[in-house]
Amino acid sequence: MNFSNQLITWYNINSRDLPWRQTNDPYKIWLSEIILQQTKVQQGLPYFNNFICEFPTIFDLANSSEDKVLKLWQGLGYYSRARNLHYTAKYICFSCNGNFPQNYKDILNLKGVGEYTASAISSFAFNKNYAVLDGNVIRVLSRVFGIYNYFDTSSGKKQFKKLADFNLPLKDSYTYNQAIMEFGALVCTPKTPKCINCIFQDECYAFNNSKVQILPKKQNKIKVKNRYLNFLIVSIGDHVLLKKKNKGIWSGLYEFPSLEFKKDISKNNVVESSQWTNFFYRNNFQINNISPIIVHKLSHQKLHIRFIHIKSDKVKPNTYQLFKKDQLLQLPVSKAIENYLSQSFI
DNA sequence: CACACGTGGCA
DNA sequence: TTGCCAAGTGT
């Protein structure tokens, strides 16, 4: 039995029962694929169910507000996915008469849909022969066939793409695509793969040459930048100051006014900084509480956050909006702010 | 094309 | 504890 058929046989016995595998509805397939980008099934599953419950059809999603979509997405990370999801729902409903594109090229053109997702939708929703190439596929192919090429280079990508296409069976490509990803997620995992019971023990290059730990090879390493943020929770009566971010981290979410510094400076230095003076220019204020520094780690940044509770009677009109405190929980916010609000009184 | 973009789990 | 990495895409 060849590689592809072994995977399909394994899949038919060992696959998980997941909601997006019980439908051909391109909306549900698309939604699941966006949610699962860089995200584990365990983490994405409840979000998928919530979205389908709140937005049973793509029209419900398109007719929603972006803030509501982001609120449902809150906690999942990579929020541009949610903004692109909403944008694309509106595009399909209002510019395509609600017809989900069916050609690979047209699907690839959708915002938030790249090569992987276009192939996945083509295969899972329209039963077309496109091989998916994601982290799971790369890992399985790299180990079984002994591919040393760095997958995050153009030549590496080409080699993996070629191999993925080569292994795609023209019959039942749907099951093969599901199978190789499921196998990568459950057996051929990044760390401590389950080689003991693996169906490819005899032919797996990595297993037979003790290369499981070093394959697949990746070139780029991420460097983490330290940032020192002070969030100002400015209360004015029963209102607080926030704004919707439109660039950088947490774009689309709401955030308190923040003062950023190059270094880890003391709270006294924050209050005496020119940034602080500039923010409160001519306005009365009173500091009620200053939180300890909370460290929030992102993939590319390590944030050192201090929350400063301030009472003020008026504020200089600027880029911030006033929100009633009891409406704060309606707004989409980052995990850092969500965590803080959940254990702190404002 | 290198980098930004979140969060959680795991060794 | 720290670093790696997960059903990637946009710029």
Image: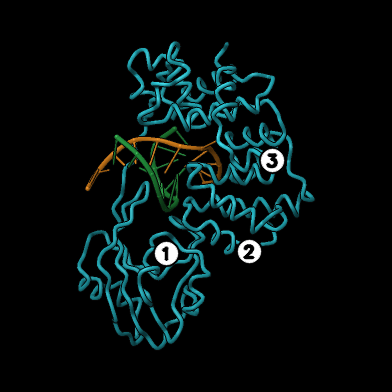
Chain colours: A cyan, B green, C orange
In the figure, B8 relative to A246: above or below?
above
Q: Quadrant of the C terminus of chain A?
A: bottom left
For the residues labelled 3 and 2, say whether their Cβ atoms are less than 8 Å apart. no
Residue at screen point 21% across, 65% down: A265
Tell which tag, 1 or 3, sits nearer the viewer: 3
- Circle nearer the N terminus (3, 2): 3
Tell which tag, 2 or 1, sits nearer the viewer: 1
Between A218 and A74, which is closer to the camera in this rendering? A74
In the rendered structure, find residue A210 and report the number of the disc placed on it: none
Question: Are tags 2 and 1 found on a single chain?
Answer: yes
Gap in angstroms between the C-alphas marked 1 and 3: 34 Å
Tell which tag, 3 or 2, sits nearer the viewer: 3
For label 2, the residue is A65
Q: Identify residue type, mark 3.
A: Thr
For label 1, the residue is A338
Helix, strand or loop for disc 3: loop
Residue A269 lies, in percent from the top left, at 21, 71
Q: Identify residue type, mark 2.
A: Ser
- Circle nearer the N terminus (2, 1): 2
For label 3, the residue is A23
In the figure, A50 relative to A1: above or below?
below
For the residues labelled 2 and 1, say whether their Cβ atoms are less than 8 Å apart. no
- Tell me the chain of label 1: A
- Tell me the chain of label 3: A
Badge 1 crowding class, 10 Å Cα cut-off, few under 14, some 14 to 19, many 20 or more, is: some
Helix, strand or loop for disc 2: loop
Residue at screen point 75% across, 55% down: A94
Q: Quadrant of the N terminus of chain A?
A: top right
Residue at screen point 36% across, 86% down: A283
Residue at screen point 77% across, 50% down: A98
Q: Identify residue type, mark 1.
A: Glu
Badge 3 crowding class, 10 Å Cα cut-off, few under 14, some 14 to 19, many 20 or more, is: few
